[in-house]
Amino acid sequence: MTHCPVCQTELTQEQISPCSTCGWDLRPYPLAFQIPEQFVQKEQAKLAWAKNMWEQFYQERSQKEAILSNFQSQLSQILSQLANVQAELQQSKAERSQLQADLQQLKEAQASLPPHLLERLNQFEYQSQALKYQKLRCVHTLEGNSRMLSSVAIHPDGQTLVSGSWDKTIKLWHLDTGELIDTFCEHSGLVTCIAISPDGTKLVSGSSDKTIKIWHLDTRKLKLLRTLEGHFGEIESVCFSPDGQIIASGSYDNTIKIWHLDTGKLQRTLKGHPTVVWSVAFSCNGLLTSGGGSDTQVKIWNWETGEIQHTLEGHSKFVSSIAISPNGMTLASGSADNTIKIWDMETRKLLHTLKGLKGLSNCIRSLAFSPDGQVIASVCNDITSASSAYDDTIKLWHMSTGQLLHILKGHSDGISCVAFSPNGELLVSGSSDKTIKIWCLS
């Protein structure tokens, strides 16, 4: 016998029994012994069964080895991709640090310029931006809501627009054509605010029903993932952290709540405003800012510890809206005192106070920075009562000088929300006139 009759393993001369691979008894029967036919048949049947079982075992083992090999290959690819992402992240951090250093040098260089040259430089920038934004034209008016539009957000791909309304609906629209994609009605109260995650895969919505809903978002539909409960008043503002893993919500119950996106778990409750928190926003370095209440202040939080790091004071009435520039260097706060204040996030100093709404009872309801951070759009609406005095225009401001660049007219009632597209070519506004307008530079 040179091979095992079951697994076909080649046998050595020294090997007698059993087979080192499958364990089959290899001992031969004595030649002088007459083996009964019935016993031979049983042995042959047992051998056939053993061969069949070994073949099955070998086949299953081969399949599992193939699966394991494939898994190891995929794991190697994932680890390689992870290493590449980590390297890119480190490079991005280094580039960001270099950019901040360059910006600081630029600031110092500008500060050292003679006043008349600095003024001429700012005026040149202002005139350039003014010529650009005077080209804005309304290209689509979207209708379909039965009450005021409370919030608009544009997907990072620049193709899809999401809107929230007091008619309790969330709508998806094609940004290029203005075509309605779908309508979703899961909240039992007014939809007061929405926000899209940085990677564009999640949407969060807040409502007067005191709940926050987390949705899976793609370009054609929404899928409700979970509902967060914990506030005792209606939700006024929601936002995502830069990494998209944390949600902050401001409410009529005077608190800010911090939630984990994937688990829906409440991480922390921040208390510091004496009344309603109208607006919350994360900076790109993870600091949380908030405005609201009768304290007329903007608060800058370390949300992980719950500590207030700084308080910005200057408004004479409650702060109704906050926006932070894409580079995280500048904060804009809008107030019921009809002014917008521009703050340096590094020094916490007031840079400009933008005025242009005197005589109206409205407040600055929404602010949006252009992607390059050079322009800010502002809109007004009365968020505390139904007032006959309203501003139905969108104002565009030059950040470096604080001057008014351009005024867009087209809505027939107060405007509640505004947003820039990722490429800066489109501006979207939602109004109490129940319409959304899409404005285009080209």
Image (spheres, helix red, strand yellow):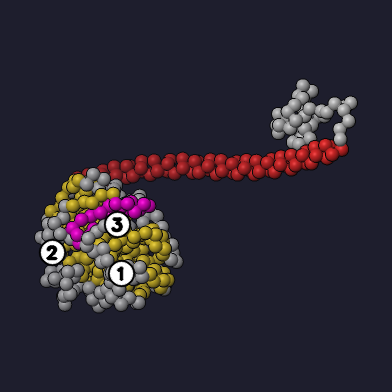
Q: Quick check: is 253 in the magenta stretch?
A: yes
Q: Amino acid at mark 2?
A: Asp
Q: Amino acid at mark 1?
A: Ser
Across and down, in percent, residue 313 comes to 13, 53
Q: Amino acid at mark 3?
A: Cys
Q: Which residue is mark 2?
A: 337
User: Is the C-beta separation of discs 2 and 1 under 8 Å?
Assistant: no
Q: Quadrant of residue 352?
A: bottom left
Residue at left offset 79%, top offset 35%:
5
Q: Which residue is mark 1?
A: 188
Q: CA distance from mark 3 to mark 1?
A: 21 Å
Q: From the image, which quarter does the C terminus lie in?
A: bottom left
Q: Which mark is residue 239?
A: 3
For residue 324, say whether it is visible.
no
Q: Mark 2 or mark 1, which is nearer to you?
A: 1
- Left or right of 307, for residue 59: right
Q: Which mark is residue 425?
A: none
- Left or right of 350, for residue 1: right
- Left or right of 70, for residue 307: left
Across and down, in percent, residue 332 comes to 21, 57
User: Is the C-beta separation of discs 3 and 2 under 8 Å?
Assistant: no
